[in-house]
Amino acid sequence: MDALHHSRLPWLLVALTLGVAGCYGQASLEVPSQGGVPVYDDPNPLPPPVEPDGSLACELSSVPGSVTLSSIATDFASQVHPAMLREDSGCISCHSSTSGRIFKVSPNAAETFYAARAAGFFTTAQGSLLGRLVTSDESARMPRGQPSWTNREIAAVASLTCQLAAVDARSPQTPPDEEFPPALLQPYSGPSVATYDNPFLSYVQLKGKVKQIFNDSWVRNNVDKFAQHVGLFGGVDYDQYFVEARVATPDFLLGMDALAPDVCGAAARNKTGPFAGLDTSALIIDIPAAATRQYEAETATDLTATVGGRITTGWNLYTNGMLTTVQPYAFPVTGTYRLTVRAYGSQCGPDAPRMDLRVDGTTATTVNVTATAYTEYTHTLTVSAGTHTLSVAFTNDYSQSGVCDRNLYVDFLRVNGPTETSTGTTRTDAARAKVDTLHRRMLYRPATAQEQANGYALVKDLYTMEADLPKAWSGLCEGLMRSPDFLFTLPPSYENRSGLERDRLLLVKLAQDLLGRTPSATELSDFESGRKSWEQMVDTYLSSTDFRTHYFHKMRIRTESEGTLETDEPARLWTYLATTGAPMQELLTGDYSVALDFSKVPRAAEHGKTGVLTMKGFIKNKPGLPHYNYAARVMTDFMGSIFEIPSEVFDMRGAATASSTVDPTSICFSCHQTLTPLAHQRLRWDDEGNYRTTDEQGRPIDDSDRNLVGVYSYKGQGMPAFAQQAVKKETFVRRTINAQYMIFFGRGMRHEEDERVIYKRLWDVSQQSNANLKAVLKSIALSPEYTRR
């Protein structure tokens, strides 16, 4: 509502009694209005009556009946939001959308208002936005280290706080932190998010892919080479490595340098895996029709000589020397060739002129040239494919003074061949077909014409370098294993495909996401033949043992298991919920455990309905009071809270106590008004996860929240009280849904940005399916966002 359209009215305040500490005593705030419309334009309103504990007393009956949640949001947009966005003394500098704070200020006023409401910042109790604006404690005052807001702006916050309290009192409804955020129902209007959204293969997915394609576990001489290289591949072994890498690293490629030659070499030689049924020893270079090239001795561009001179019909080698081809001859294929030299000699002495035919300087044959007129001398030999230099050498010059002189005369050098029967393009075509087969079996798509040409050229070049055809084919296989189509969960060439080819590549991703491997031949056949639809493939995968195994692996990482039976227990519960359809709330409220075979088993009565919260494997290594690691992890893992610890907190943390951190003047209070009550509720469980009824001094334990913080949302006795209320919160539902989302996308859901639509869809699925995680997983797999439709 535009405040400038209304007359200024003073605040109507009940008499205020000034307290000893300089704060207001018993007082209440009436909302000034004119004609039922709140007024905000008084430049010098009286300060709102905020109690020492930060609470605000409101006269709810003074709030006009025309005020609604929608009108409050509208007034917030004009009266408060601009102050939050300004650089000087605003909120945006600390609470921008890119910050790690729990509460973020969005450029969109409605989003900011509803987020602040859900976070409890418009409550009349302590911990509100108003309380932080007016406190005299500089460590808690906001905006921190900047000028205070004006009286008019603070009064507007107080007015909106009281209005909201009145609206909520008139028509009780679902608590704002238990409903889908109204702001996220608005279309996203922020900047477009342009990222390459395609996860790299994980360690487990790489193992599964190699096993599926090569039928090779990479075990050599009883040594698991994958386990040996787990660090390079960013995997988890619960011995030295506990955190899975989320992005590709240079070390990953070093691991591929060890993996690819080994598995490809074995497969190429044994004709297994992608080479099954392929003859990797078959010749790949065709025999062309015989060709002839004649090098004329008298032509400078054909042959060059070290000695002698040109004559009308050729070249006279009148002393030891050599004629050599100016340009090497390209022998198209390894085969039999005829080298012919037309020559004669001038005879002198006991021996005839001796002529060597040489290939790359090595003598192939020696001929005694007895002819005294031009005669053709032919030698047949095997030459390897490639370019070779050819030479004719005169090696036994001789003369008798005044009597005779032995010389060698050369007319031409001719190359003819290959002499074998031409094969046309048979071998090349067969080799290119093998290239295509390898693409289909390793990358799950046919090779393009260019890829076939490039693959064939690579194999041919490798074979030319080293005459080992299986090794040459292994080289191509190694190259394909380093292809983006192999290394990303969704082959990037998906973008350039259509129809069945596109669907096949998406199935590759689905199998890797849900099963940790690529599809089997049977699965591909079922899908491509139409025997199973996409939805049926999703159902098949979600019902499989492979899914249960892979999901368990993902949850072991999420719960930071140490690979023991105890620390695996939380992951087994996650897996039980995802595979049976039990409500996700039982993650925190389940009164049972899950055995090694993933069956439901009872547990001791003292656990009550606390799910993972009182599992020994979850509590271990998470201290309780006074440092709150357990409480912080619960709030982060299941409620989506992020805690930033300023340097001054580290400085005082060693001497911190539960009482000091809930002191309203303490720097810790803003966070620990959640953490300390939760830490008290956990007191019946020591830091090793053992149940107890008395503390270290033998005194009875009070594991209630002790009413330390008035706005604590999880009040009650022990961890069951916390759990029963926590599972109702939107943040719990979102955090649990997000754990499923990350399985498919490798990242968290951008629920406040461009993915609010899919979040609402998954929220609805959760509500309609009795919080069935399998239903959520299926909805993601069928979504247009995942299938890119």
Image (cartoon, rainbow, N blue to C red):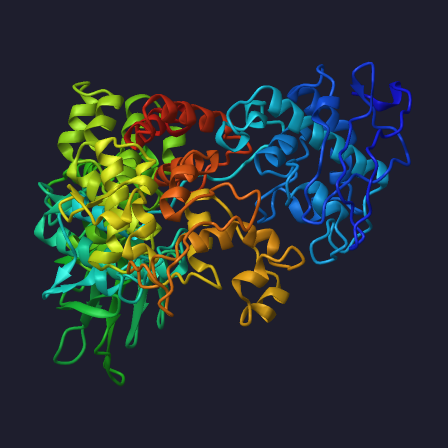
Q: Locate the N terminus and report the quarter of the image it occupies.
A: top right
- In the displayed structure, 309 sits above or below 54; it is below
Q: Foreground: 417 or 190?
A: 190
Left or right position of 191 against 46: left
Please state the horizontal and vertical placement of residue 31, each as a whole percent of the image. 78, 26
Q: Residue at x 70, y 15 (%)?
A: 65
Q: Quadrant of residue 296?
A: bottom left
Please state the horizontal and vertical placement of residue 64, each as a whole percent of the image. 74, 18
Q: Quadrant of residue 149?
A: top right
- In the displayed structure, 671 sits above or below 744; it is below
Q: Quadrant of residue 427?
A: top left
Please state the horizontal and vertical placement of residue 73, each as a whole percent of the image. 68, 25
Q: Residue at x 21, y 55 (%)?
A: 463
Please state the horizontal and vertical placement of residue 518, each as a whole percent of the image. 23, 39
- In the displayed structure, 526 sits above or below 128; it is above
Left or right position of 577 against 88: left
Q: Locate the C terminus and report the quarter of the image it occupies.
A: top left
Q: Which residue of the protein is positioned furthest toward the bottom in this rendering?
A: 401
Q: Foreground: 619 or 777?
A: 619
Left or right position of 448 against 163: left
- In the displayed structure, 318 sits above or below 507; it is below
Left or right position of 511 against 267: right
Q: Is residue 337 visible?
A: no
Q: Foreground: 516 or 78?
A: 78
